[in-house]
Image: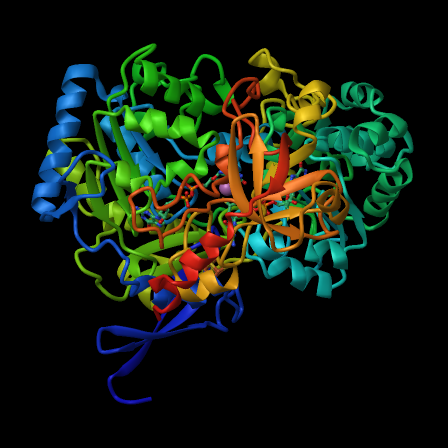
Amino acid sequence: MSSQLREVKTACHVCHGGCGAIVTLDGDRLVNIRPDPDSPLSKGRMCPKGLHGLELVYSPRRLQYPMKRAGKRGEGKWQRISWEEAYSILAENIARIRRESGPESIVVAQGTGRRHLKHTCRFANALGTPNWIEPGTAQCFFPRVCTGMITYGTMPVVDYYGEKAPGVILVWGSNPTVSGADGELQFHIRDAMKKGSRVIVVDPKRTELADKADLHLQIRPGTDAALALGILNFLISNKLYDRAFVEEWTYGFDQLAERCRDYPLDKVSAITGLAAEEIGQAALLMSAHLPCALEWGCALEHTPNCFQTVRALALIPAILGSFDVPGGFIEGMHLMPEADILIHKLPDEQGYKRMGEAEYKLLAGVGNACPAAHVPTLFHAMKTGEPYPIRGLLLFGNNGLMGFANSKDTYAAYSNMEFISCMDLFMTPTAELADLVLPASSWLEADGVYSAPSLAGHVVLCQKKLCQIGECKQDEEVFCELARRLGLDYEAEDFHKILNDQLSHVAARCPEYAGLDFERMKEINYIQIPIEYEQYKKRGKFQTPTGKLELWSTTMEQLGLDPLPSFREPPESPVSQPELAQEYPLILTTGGRQRGYFISENRQVPSLRRLAPFPLCEIHPEDAATYGIADGEWVYIASPRGKITQKAKVTDRQKKGVVNCQLGWWYPEVETPDHGWMESNCNLLTSNEPPYDPNSGTYQLRALLCRISPNPEGKRIEERYYNSDITKEK
Ligand SMILES: Nc1nc2c(c(=O)[nH]1)N[C@H]1C(S)=C(S)[C@@H](COP(=O)(O)OP(=O)(O)OC[C@H]3O[C@@H](n4cnc5c(=O)[nH]c(N)nc54)[C@H](O)[C@@H]3O)O[C@H]1N2
Ligand SMILES: Nc1nc2c(c(=O)[nH]1)N[C@H]1C(S)=C(S)[C@@H](COP(=O)(O)OP(=O)(O)OC[C@H]3O[C@@H](n4cnc5c(=O)[nH]c(N)nc54)[C@H](O)[C@@H]3O)O[C@H]1N2
Ligand code: SF4
Ligand SMILES: [Mo]
């Protein structure tokens, strides 16, 4: 290595995980990224998103300076300005709207779990607005976390970390070898399988993981709650559950048993499209290879029965006695808390103004740890001014035209705002709607600390600022400066104070790290503590209202919600709407994560785009034959809400009768300010109309209806890409 070259360890956090990376610098230029074999989590592995980080950092398409709108909104005309002017514009607009209409008329929005997530909430709470949103929350992770809290008093995770591998991993509505599951890394499940864990996959698609699984249940989309209740019933009626654990540590078993009796195998088979034998076989496999741990995904959270669906699933490891045992469904160590969101600074009277507060208590209720506004209720207010005006929209990493259901509605709501600012790495179609655009730092240009995996939290990782691109800043810096200018009580002049506050908890727990701060953490890189099991036994109780594992949820009972899980047919399905299904005969599911992309990110990163240059719509060969579609052909996919085009992937991996449309597709190579957001974006097909989940306000991103037909014009999308600079950039 030449004398100018040096290597620095850092952590990638482009997804919800955290892989150790070794970055080589030549002077102040980054020249290489490789996996760090010493990382206690990733152990020398990274995925393409992290490995191609240099193409992201040095992309000629990066936003590098603040810019203000120079033409009409959405016209794509921008003028470079200084940060000083940008801060003035922001502070003036926020102060004016707050003064005239109250802070609740300003929406603060972001995207899923990126580095600055809790800092955005902190800023919103300090500002006094209860209307904080992101496209996940009710549709992602929150229902699982909330279920974990009210059922177990904690959010359990699969024990990938101890000596003993799980007996059975129930992979349900999740594809963790690609997506990494929420807060974990994609490598862990393969490691567990090598150590002997059995795997049951519940997925309409035969994923690569399903090929290697012991059992694959190819379920009809949106019927997961029925399957879970059928499995619970089978385990209970055949006395295959852990009787000693259930008697001593659970609450409401008899009521659960009674509820489950409504779900005998033949009925569940008719609902789910699975054979009764395979459902029984799954239950037998789980009970024969304990402990059983659950790897559940966001597919379960994309229907209006999502909350009871994840509740039903959560009870399977519970009655099998698999909670918090080695190789089971374990409580995390919570070595370091996330950044304090200052929720105590948001007065209750402001909290009660949160959109959806009265209707969706679990999501938006005052008293919750991190409440969010109900997106469809908020968007309605943004469009109509009812029940009160919403005037300002501050976006910090939110490409909302891609992430929220019913993109036309998102467009209408956003366009109606008096003032929009957008901080992002790139000029996205959503950023093009703004009045002010701010350039954000990527993971290689930012300081941060993470407790990882985010739920097990037995490792602390350090991310370091290694270079400066243009005038990019971290979102955290902007929040501190804005708070200062607005005179908010933010408890931090500099965001490093927030990092140091987080690290002080590590020091309090592990005396060997006394005095730990960010500067020292930069030298240490990783802190790891061992997992401790059966924490509830040491405590003598579960951290729930009854002190037991609550099969019957007293929290839900108190809120007037159903304390036991149940199944409801998806509202737009061949069963619930047979007439509509004549017109739209196929079941639509969306999402299905891709290795090189993170939701709508990375289409402009050449090496990642090459891995998957076009959006794919997966369809079974028999359905393709019925609708005259050839593999690789561009097709139209239409739902009652809209029509898009993607490229057909004809594959018998997809369940017959089901179509999956990939998520997050816009085209950076389109130079007009829309950047093609209306061409292939699957959220033009999804619904933000009621019914919503009565518990969490969740809307529908999957288990909808659609039809499909050839699109002879589609090839131009390929020509456009192959003629664009993205193919030439390096
Ligand atoms: N590379 C990469 N990693 C990511 C992301 C990314 O965009 N790219 N996104 C991150 C985010 S925000 C999240 S929430 C996670 C999501 O990651 P996962 O939870 O793994 O979600 P998906 O990959 O969208 O879908 C998982 C599976 O659900 C199946 N499925 C569809 N409908 C149904 C259904 O009704 N029932 C059942 N049982 N299965 C169904 C699909 O066929 C698919 O294989 O990944 C995170 N990690
Ligand atoms: N139909 C359908 N819709 C879905 C899903 C689905 O499966 N199907 N999945 C849902 C789920 S689970 C989720 S969590 C949401 C996710 O939705 P989002 O997380 O909102 O995803 P993106 O649209 O990619 O928008 C995030 C933006 O943040 C920018 N960004 C990245 N890092 C930073 C940073 O450090 N600072 C700033 N300021 N910006 C940054 C990116 O460039 C990108 O433009 O989507 C949901 N929408
Ligand atoms: S798995 Fe996540 S943390 Fe690891 S390299 Fe990929 S994007 Fe980065
Ligand atoms: Mo998500």
Q: Is residue 555 left or right of residue 495?
A: right
Q: The N terminus appears in which quarter of the rendering?
A: bottom left
Q: Quadrant of residue 490?
A: top left
Where is residue 487 drawn, in percent x and y? Answer: 13, 31
Where is residue 347 drawn, in percent x and y? Answer: 29, 19
- Residue at the spot x=83%, y=20% of the render? 262
- Residue at the spot x=32%, y=20% of the render? 382
Q: Residue furthest bottom?
A: 2
- Residue at the spot x=33%, y=50% of the render? 504
Where is residue 272 drawn, in percent x and y? Answer: 78, 32
Q: The C terminus appears in which quarter of the rendering?
A: bottom left
- Residue at the spot x=59%, y=18% of the render? 556
Compare residues 302 and 503 and report the one nearer the observer: 302
Residue 154 makes an appearance in the image:
no
| In the depicted structure, whether residue 610 falls above or below residue 337 | below
| In the depicted structure, whether residue 138 falls above or below residue 629 | above
Q: Is residue 676 left or right of residue 446?
A: right
Residue 572 makes an appearance in the image:
yes
| In the depicted structure, whether residue 222 falls above or below residue 380 | below
Q: Is residue 286 left or right of residue 524?
A: right
Where is residue 334 drawn, in percent x and y? Answer: 49, 46
Protein image colouring: rainbow
Compare residues 235 and 648 and report the one nearer the observer: 648
In this rendering, the count of numbered labels is: 0
Compare residues 539 and 49 and report the one nearer the observer: 49
